[in-house]
Amino acid sequence: GTDSSGSPSSSIGSIVASPAACLTFKDLSFSARMPRGEQKVILEPCSGHFEAGELVAIMGPSGCGKTTLLDMLALKKTAAYSGQVLVNGHRRNPALFPRIAAYVDQEDRMPAYWKVREALEFSAALKHPRSASTSQSQKVAAGLVDHLLEAFGLTGVAETYIGSDRVRGTSGGQRRRVSLARGVAAQASILFCDEPTSGLSAADAALCVKALREIAKRMNVLTLVVIHQPRRLVAELFDTLVLLTSNPGRMAYFGSMEQAPTYMENCGYPLPTRENPADFFLDLLTPGSDLDASDALVAAFERKQKLDLAKVVEEALIKQGPTIKQMVLATYQRPLQDKPVVVAGKYIRVNPYAVSFSSQLSVLLKRRVRLTMRDLGAVGMQIGMPIGFGVIWGLLFGGIGTKAYGVQTLLFVFIVLLMISLQSLPLMQLLIDERTIMKRETSERLYTEGAHILSGFLVTVPLCLVGATLQILIIYAFSQLPLEYLPTVVGWVLLLFLTFDGMFSAVAAAAPNGNQAMIVAVPFLAMSILFNGLVISRASAPSYLLWVFDVSPMRYALQAIMLRLGESATEEEKAGVFRVLGFTHGESLKGLVVIVCMLFVFRVLQVLFTKYMHNPQK
């Protein structure tokens, strides 16, 4: 991907080249508190410096602190650690660092019904600053996506679904390359990859690293990769090698990948003929192995490399380049066909998010609509099932409106309200699955949690409302109740649906998994079902539980509908129902206020739980 001078061989490479970012770290260390309270050193203080466009391999045995080092450099470590990390000689700005850095973890978390091209376009749209010319922005983004599809060998599957265990789509190796390409599509100057070849075949692993090397050189992206025992041909693709040993994590080598075998030979450990250098290095650095030389190599590093490395680090601190803010501003001036990009308006966004909330919402809505229309199972759950149940219950209660007002009418209304209340219950697992993807994407500052929640509300809730409305209309048609009661019935039914939908959404945002969500949601649902006047009446309830009737949304809905349906009944028929259930007139406004307040509280809790719970802990 480069000519003899090392410059990009493609004009595309120069168009999408990232602002240069050098990464320096000094005395970076981490200790973890163990269950008994004692401190365990995971990584002893270490220092180093990486130049823009380098492809770096971080290797070592299990427990040496490879991922810990990567997470600290990537600003992903949530636990406290010590040391300094600088970009171009300046201290990192935690708020703006996500604008120039991307992190690809070991798991490929993406929607199954997403197409490969759409995945890259999504990241590019949310990380590429908008210009005054929409067509100009789209042209830049399209050129970047096409370039990445080619570089990562994904052009042939650009219109293929990402796929999953139940949806046919890309292979595991292709999915991993999509994750890596999305990191680059996010306009990153620094790309962090945690074991991108883990679980892949040798051929897929080689394709991944070759693509990373091409991107590093053509787009000037500093790429740091934690990798475990790569093949010889894969290892030779890296420019720089960082070797760590374990118990505790210590640096044993920092330098050129090409010079590593010569360095080991000078330390008294020549590489055996036909031996894979990566395997040999790991054997030397694994405490307790037959070739264990970890302590000797750490000592050799301190004698031979540590002082020189310290000088490089100090020089990097003195030789300062652009700050992260300046790098962000530079992204607004990237050339396109020798013309500067004109920024929309006078305000340039210098904050963690590259695009405005409205732009985030627009991109998320576009994705959600596409995914929803493609997932026929989800559409069937939200529209098909309610229609089916509507027909079943309609047949069971057919002609109820022609019969005398009484117990059968009461059971009919109760069953309708119960079915509507349960309609969003199966969607909790879908919300939890979406949350897993959302947490990864929001950690990369692609969009805010609020944009995610609002996009879901604007697509999923209307779809469910359509299903609920069709269900009640079908049941109502079979019931042969007078049309004059329809607005009251539909109004209270949909209010009840929205209330329980909000409650289930809040529970799904808080619960760690689907089973826990069901355990938490069922008691709330049971309380509303029990304390509605039908199962337990005010007269029979204990005095200390009477307050539950005042906050039971199903009670208000059941009471309001029964009172309306009873307007044409005889006094004797009404007395038989009202006396037993304790229904009273004049509570509709109170019920409406209670339900609206509950709905508001549930949605606020959903936002808070989504934003502050289940964040990745590292």
Image (cartoon, grey):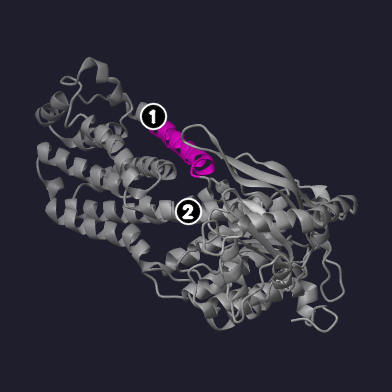
The percent position of residue 245, horizontal first and vertical second, equals 61, 56
* 12 sits left or right of 585 in the view: right
Dot 2 crowding, Cα within 10 Å, few <14, some 14–19, many 20+: some
Inspect the image, locate mark 1, and give the three-letter code of the amino acid beneath it. Val
Residue 527 location, quadrant: top left
Res 436 label: 2
Q: Which residue in the protein does label 1 denote?
A: 594
Res 92 label: none
| Residue 74 higher or lower than 119, as above or below | above
The percent position of residue 169, horizontal first and vertical second, equals 44, 75
Residue 210 location, quadrant: bottom right
The answer to whether one can see residue 149 in this image is no
* 14 sits left or right of 66 in the view: right
Q: Are marks 2 and 1 in contact (CB under 8 Å)?
A: no
Q: Is residue 171 magenta?
A: no
Please tell me which residue lies in front, 364 or 226.
226
Dot 1 crowding, Cα within 10 Å, few <14, some 14–19, many 20+: some
Question: What number of labels is visible?
Answer: 2
| Residue 617 higher or lower than 534, as above or below | below
Please tell me which residue lies in front, 91 or 136.
91
| Residue 498 higher or lower than 584, as above or below | below
The percent position of residue 617, horizontal first and vertical second, equals 53, 45
SS type, badge 2 = helix
Q: Which residues are magenta?
A: 593-614
Residue 78 location, quadrant: top right
| Residue at the image position 38 percent from the left and 43 percent from the top | 498
| Residue at the image position 12 percent from the left and 38 percent from the top | 405
* 367 sits left or right of 528 in the view: right
SS type, badge 1 = helix
The percent position of residue 448, horizontal first and vertical second, equals 60, 49
* 319 sits left or right of 217 in the view: right
